Amino acid sequence: MTLRYDPRDAAEIRVFDQDRFLCRAICPELAGTVITLHDVLKARKQRRRGLVAKLQERTKAVEQLLDIKRHDSVESVERLATDRNEKKATGPRLKRYLNE
């Protein structure tokens, strides 16, 4: 299904199936309402700005989560290093085979 519409006439859409015209769908609430090209451009610009702002917020949230994860991974690596040093100091370790 393909829907086609004229941005200046929000009341009517044309419905196509495999490039064959099926019907026109008309919204009675919007019939007779004329939308100027300026209004369409203004609405698109406003929507674009909203989407850009939302993307910026999400990018900041992802960066914060990545920073937290990086910080946690650095701490876990440091903990592993200290644990290994403590184990070496406590006594002999079991010998392990190469394939383990």
Image: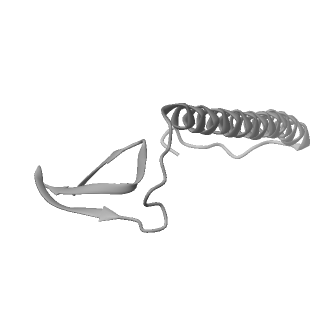
Vertical position of residue 41 compared to residue 27: above or below: above
Left or right of 17: which side holds 60?
right
Closest to the observer: 87 or 64? 64
Vertical position of residue 3 compared to residue 49: above or below: below
Evaluate whether residue 18 shows in this view: no
Which residue reaches farthest front? 32
> What is the image's colouring?
one colour
Which residue reaches farthest bottom? 28
Left or right of 41: which side holds 83?
right
**Residue in the image at 67% along x and 39% along y:** 50
**Residue in the image at 65% along x and 33% along y:** 49
Q: Quadrant of residue 52?
A: top right
Position in image of residue 39 (x %, y %): 56, 37
**Residue in the image at 89% along x and 39% along y:** 86
Closest to the observer: 56 or 88? 56
Position in image of residue 70 (x %, y %): 76, 33
Left or right of 88: which side holds 58?
left
Q: Quadrant of residue 56?
A: top right
Position in image of residue 47 (x %, y %): 60, 39
Evaluate whether residue 4 shows in this view: yes
**Residue in the image at 30% along x and 64% along y:** 25
Quadrant for the N terminus, please.
bottom left
Closest to the observer: 57 or 23? 23
Q: Quadrant of residue 90?
A: top right
Number of marks in picture: 0
Vertical position of residue 65 compared to residue 33: above or below: above
Position in image of residue 4 (x %, y %): 28, 48
